[in-house]
């Protein structure tokens, strides 16, 4: 009897020990602010806060293994060295064949980030301050001054207005030529010499070309500014230096659209290349890029266009993991009691 009782106690403790061990989980993640990163030595971010809430609800104990790349994180789930993976993991059909996912924990999509100076729109002020326009204006003033002084040379003995010495004649002569171009001249100051009249006609006809040059110059500067300026949509990516993360959903999308891009092994390398002005645009998960543009890159980066290729993030488990159903039920509970919304507001503000 004593032996049976002792065996029952040992079996109970062994069962409890196994259950405790089964619930001590290995979690793999990767640095993806604002979903998963380390701040002041602590694991933080939207996904890590959600993991903590799930663990509290399910009575889990867990350790976090932070790896260098997204591929390493998913690989740990596939080979069973991790019990689950959490960060900003898009649920895709291809990944579903290699691992199991919970119900969506976040709705996201792709977006384009460009340098701040490239996000500005072409403006009349920018066109007016262009170097090319200043050169055109300088040439126009030189032509008017030269034409006015030629008229002074022809008319100084025949027209009282031009009867001045050289030191006094340059501005009245320029003023006469300017009024001739703008207003068609002065009736009482009509040239009287044959050469003066020929020059007057030439200046009037030339004024049409001068005005046309100014208009064309402003238009061309604004057109070039618009063409070489901001990337506003996916269609503007062709011919640009585009960057994204290799083997990501963004990379697959760009491949389908036949947009050439540079693939980076991790987020930091891509953002460093962007900061060093090696890229005209970055295409990646909208929340990740928005967080960078609002924090580390707030002076150098701007988001452009809308969110496209909507996708959902989930928690990844090895195929057949018995934990998936428990997590799904816990996620529903966290949504119902407001815990999920509280975590969401902490990192992204109120939902629309």
Image (cartoon, rainbow, N blue to C red):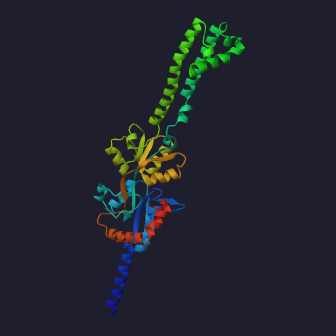
Q: Would you say 25 lies left or right of 221 here?
A: left
Instruction: Kindly give the residue lying farthest to the front in the view shown.
Output: 188
Image location (x, y in percent) of residue 286: 43, 52
Image location (x, y in percent) of residue 177: 60, 17
Residue at 39% in and 63% down: 105
65, above or below 303, in the image: below
| Quadrant of the image occupied by residue 148 | top right
Residue situated in front as seen by the camera: 285 or 269: 285
Residue at 39% in and 42% down: 261
99, above or below 143, in the image: below
Residue situated in front as seen by the camera: 135 or 249: 135
Residue 132 visible from this viewpoint = yes
Residue at 51% in and 16% down: 205
6, above or below 85, in the image: below
Image location (x, y in percent) of residue 21: 38, 73
Residue situated in front as seen by the camera: 256 or 67: 256
Q: Would you say 128 lies left or right of 282 here?
A: right
- Image quadrant occupied by the C terminus: bottom left
Residue situated in front as seen by the camera: 104 or 186: 186
Residue 61 visible from this viewpoint = no
- Image quadrant occupied by the N terminus: bottom left
Image location (x, y in percent) of residue 312: 36, 58
């Amino acid at each position: 009897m004593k032996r049976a009782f002792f065996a029952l106690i040992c079996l109970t403790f062994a069962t409890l020990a196994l259950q405790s061990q089964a619930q001590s989980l290995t979690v793999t993640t990767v640095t993806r602010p604002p979903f998963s990163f380390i701040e002041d030595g602590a694991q933080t971010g939207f996904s890590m806060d959600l993991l903590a809430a799930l663990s509290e609800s399910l009575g889990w104990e867990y350790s976090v293994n932070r790896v260098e790349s997204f591929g390493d994180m998913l690989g740990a789930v596939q080979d069973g060295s991790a019990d689950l993976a959490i960060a900003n993991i898009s649920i895709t059909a291809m990944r579903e064949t290699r691992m199991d996912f919970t119900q969506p924990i976040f709705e996201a999509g792709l977006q384009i980030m460009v340098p701040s100076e490239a996000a500005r729109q072409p403006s009349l002020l920018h066109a007016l301050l262009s170097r090319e326009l200043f050169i055109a204006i300088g040439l126009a003033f030189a032509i008017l001054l030269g034409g006015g002084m030629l008229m002074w040379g022809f008319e100084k003995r025949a027209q009282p207005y031009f009867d001045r010495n050289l030191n006094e004649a340059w501005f009245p002569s320029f003023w006469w030529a300017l009024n001739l171009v703008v207003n068609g001249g002065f009736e009482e100051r009509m040239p009287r010499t044959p050469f003066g009249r020929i020059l007057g006609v030439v200046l009037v006809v030339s004024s049409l070309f001068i005005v046309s040059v100014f208009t064309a110059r402003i238009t061309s500067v604004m057109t070039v500014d618009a063409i070489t300026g901001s990337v506003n949509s996916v269609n503007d990516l062709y011919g640009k230096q585009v960057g994204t993360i290799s083997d990501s959903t963004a990379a697959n999308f760009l491949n389908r659209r036949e947009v050439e891009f540079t693939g980076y092994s991790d987020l930091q390398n891509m953002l460093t290349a962007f900061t060093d002005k090696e890229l005209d645009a970055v295409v990646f998960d909208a929340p990740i890029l928005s967080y960078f543009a609002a924090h580390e890159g707030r002076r150098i980066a701007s988001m452009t266009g809308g969110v496209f290729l909507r996708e959902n993030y989930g928690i990844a488990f090895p195929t057949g993991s018995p934990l998936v159903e428990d997590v799904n039920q816990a996620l529903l509970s966290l949504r119902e009691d407001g815990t999920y919304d509280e975590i969401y507001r902490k990192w992204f503000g109120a939902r629309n």
